[in-house]
Image (spheres, rainbow, N blue to C red):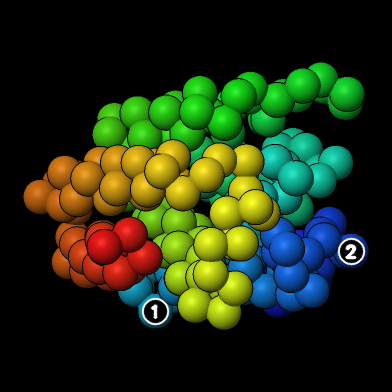
Amino acid sequence: MIFEAIIFACKAHEGHFRKGTNIPYVSHLTNVMKILLEYGYDEEVAVAGLLHDTVEDTPVTIEEVEQAFGLRVAQLVKGATEPSKLYQQEGEEEAPWKERKSHTIDYVAREKDEAVLALALADKLDNIRAITRDYRRVGEAIWDRFNAPYEQQNWYYYSLAEAFLSRQEEFGEDYRALTEEFSDAVREMFP
C-alpha cells in the first residue's frame, strides 16, 4: 500500500514545490512517512502521512482517498486536514492564518487518537526541520515565504509543542519520543 500511496501522492502533487524552493513537495510527504515508520507507526498511518496534504492542497477528495486506501487512512487524513479546507469550494477564500493555526493547536489538545497526533507531529517536525535548514542558508529572508512573520511562527510552534507535550502521559513511548524530538527542534529554531 505504501508504494501505491507514493504514486498517488506524486500524481496529486505533480508540479508542487516546497515554499520558496525548487524541492518537489512530495519530498515532504515521504519525510513524514519516514518519520512515522521510524517511530513505529503502522503502514496505514504511514500512508496517511504520505497523503496528509492531498485533500488540503489538491483537487483530490476525502472520498477518493477512502476509495483508494480504506476508511482508516481516510479518517487519519481527515484528522490532519484543516476543516476550512476539507470541504472548501473552488474559489472560496480560506480562513485567516491565525484562526487556522489556533484551530490546529486546540485540535491537538483534545484529539483522542494517538495516530492522528503522531501524523500531525511528523508533519510539523519535518516542517520545523526544513525551516531550520533554510534559515541557516538564507537567514531572515525565510520569513518572506510564509503567511506569518517570525513572531507568529514562534508563537505557533511553541504552542504546538506545548500541546503535544501535554498529551505525553496518555500515549506510548513512541509518541513520547516523537514529542520530545519535535520540542527540541522547536527550541533549536526559536531559542
Residue at image position (33%, 59%) is 190
Residue position for label 2: 15
Image label count: 2
Category of crowding for the residue at label 1, using alpha-carbon neighbours closer than 10 angstroms: few (below 14), some (14–19), many (at least 20): few
Cα separation, mark 1 vs mark 2, equals: 28 Å
* Amino acid under disc 1: Glu
Q: Can you say which quadrant of the picture contains the C terminus?
A: bottom left
Q: Residue at x 61, y 62 (%)?
A: 141
**In front of the other: label 1 or label 2?**
2
Who's the residue at 88% across and 23% down the image? 91
The residue pinned by badge 1 equals 38
Horizontal relation, residue 88 to residue 160: left or right: right
Dividing the picture into quadrants, the one containing residue 6 is bottom right
Determine which quarter of the picture holds residue 167.
top left
- Where residue 125 appears, x then y in whole percent? 42, 63
Assign the N terminus to one quadrant of the image.
bottom right
Identify which residue is drawn at 37% across, 48% down.
154
Mark 1 or mark 2, which has the lower sequence index?
A: 2
- Label 2: element kind: loop
- Quadrant of res 48: bottom right
